[in-house]
Amino acid sequence: MTNNPYRPRDWDNHPPLIYSDYKSTVLRNPQKPLIPIRQSLTEITGPVYGHDALGPLDHDLTKNAAKNGAPIGERIIVTGQVLDEDGRPVPNTLIEIWQANAAGRYIHIREVHDAPLDPNFLGAGRFMTDESGQYRFITIKPGSYPWGNHLNAWRPAHIHFSLFGPAFASRLVTQMFFEGDPTFPFDPIYNSVPEGARGRLVAKFSMDLTEPEWAHAYVFDIVLRGRHATPMEN
Amino acid sequence: MTKLQQTPSQTLGPFFAYGLTPEQYGYAHKAIAGNTLAAPGVPGEHVRIEGRIFDGAGAPIDDAMIEIWQADSEGHYAGADGDEAVSAGDFGGFGRCGTDDEGGFWFATIKPGAIGDGQAPHIGIIVQARGILNHLFTRIYFADEAAANGADPALKSVPEDRRNTLIAVRSETPAGPVYRFDIHMQGDDETVFFDV
């Protein structure tokens, strides 16, 4: 194993820690500067899962919680490739997703939005990328839902993504949005991302990957931190 | 220059529990990781790490997720010698815990050994919650490792009056050793977070 450290988080591509339009950021982030740390084995290693850690339906959210039928809503394919900054595929890395149902309702016990739960939909899934870093989920297109940040606040429809990549340092948690959502201009979470980078959170509709008589496809590629070309100093 | 730009980070939001920590909260979905890292037979000193997390107003954060990554009792990281996955029952070194109504979290694990590069024994931590747009890195060190802590390069890079925010205090209980590690997002005791 090489011990090359990971490139830093590129703050031109990530939100600031405190973004006051998103009110929950104000008291929940440090006010003192982050302290630089020289990466060591703690940062350049990370949890490794085998393909056997996953269940056979983990990738298919239309089936993995079905009780007596199919979930309501528009069935979609969400697919893409996980890469590092150098364009190298990230194989065998765990992706975890969670989302609201078609009505914009999360199954979470604290969710109070007055929209129906779907007895056949949980909204959680997993995938282990293949040798070329590819993944593919089958799910239901999530609905937009209201939240309490400000009057008439609505989250654009989105799917939460959690990835490890090869190391503790390459961890990424993000959200995938859908092309053409009319609520983008009003969402402080989406707009916390620097303007030039926001578009990379938006999945693109793909006619090529759409399956006839079955489901629209959306493509969402994910880029994790890459590694420096030179090893760590000792 | 890199070819591609990093995908922007976003908050995990308030509703991660059924996706990331489902068994802890009773959802019908298998968890990939939990807060018990070490089965009884795993070599090393079995310890409990517990703490609470507070926001800048001193209120507990009841929808945070704490993740830990650590070496085994001999200072070895699972998977570090290759890409082989960890088998069931082995010490994987990764744990995940959502916080309770009091902002509390805990892990049943073993105390890690030093990894042999001059650093004191420590555990890597990732903190996430609604309102945290970029996950935050910190570390747990151990109060009973004073000599090693004094020589640790990361601790030495932290202003002296803030180092104690990274050091878990040990107590002996009938159930075994407990290390206490509270996290303060802001304030006089603001926890040190690292730019990893």
Image (cartoon, coloured by chain):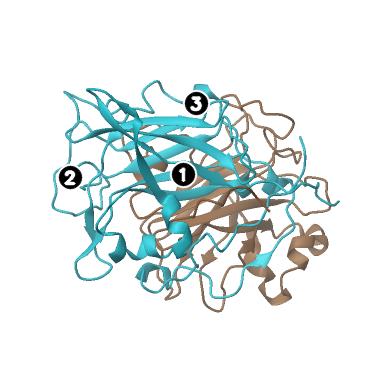
Q: Position of residue A226 (x, y in %)?
A: 65, 46
Query: Is residue B156 at all visible to an observer of this figure?
Result: yes
Colour brown belongs to chain = B
> Foreground residue, A212 or A232?
A212
Question: At label 2, which amino acid type do we have?
Answer: Ala
Residue carrying label 2? A103
Q: Colour of chain A?
A: cyan
The numbered mark 3 sits on a residue in which chain? A
Say few, some or many: other residues with alpha carbon within 10 Å of mark 1 (under 14 / 14 to 19 / 20 or more).
many
- Identify the chain of the residue marked 1, using the numbered disc in the image: A
Q: Are marks 1 and 3 on the same chain?
A: yes
Badge 3 element: helix
Q: Are marks 3 and 2 on the same chain?
A: yes
Please report whichever mark, 3 or 2, sits nearer to the chain's N-terminal start: 3
Q: Quadrant of residue A98?
A: top left
Disc 1 designates what residue?
A: A162
Please give left or right for residue B77 compared with residue A183 in the image.
right
- SS under mark 1: strand
User: Which amino acid, mark 3?
Assistant: Ala
Q: Residue furthest right?
A: A234
User: Which residue, given by chain and number where applicable, does mark 3 sit on?
Assistant: A53
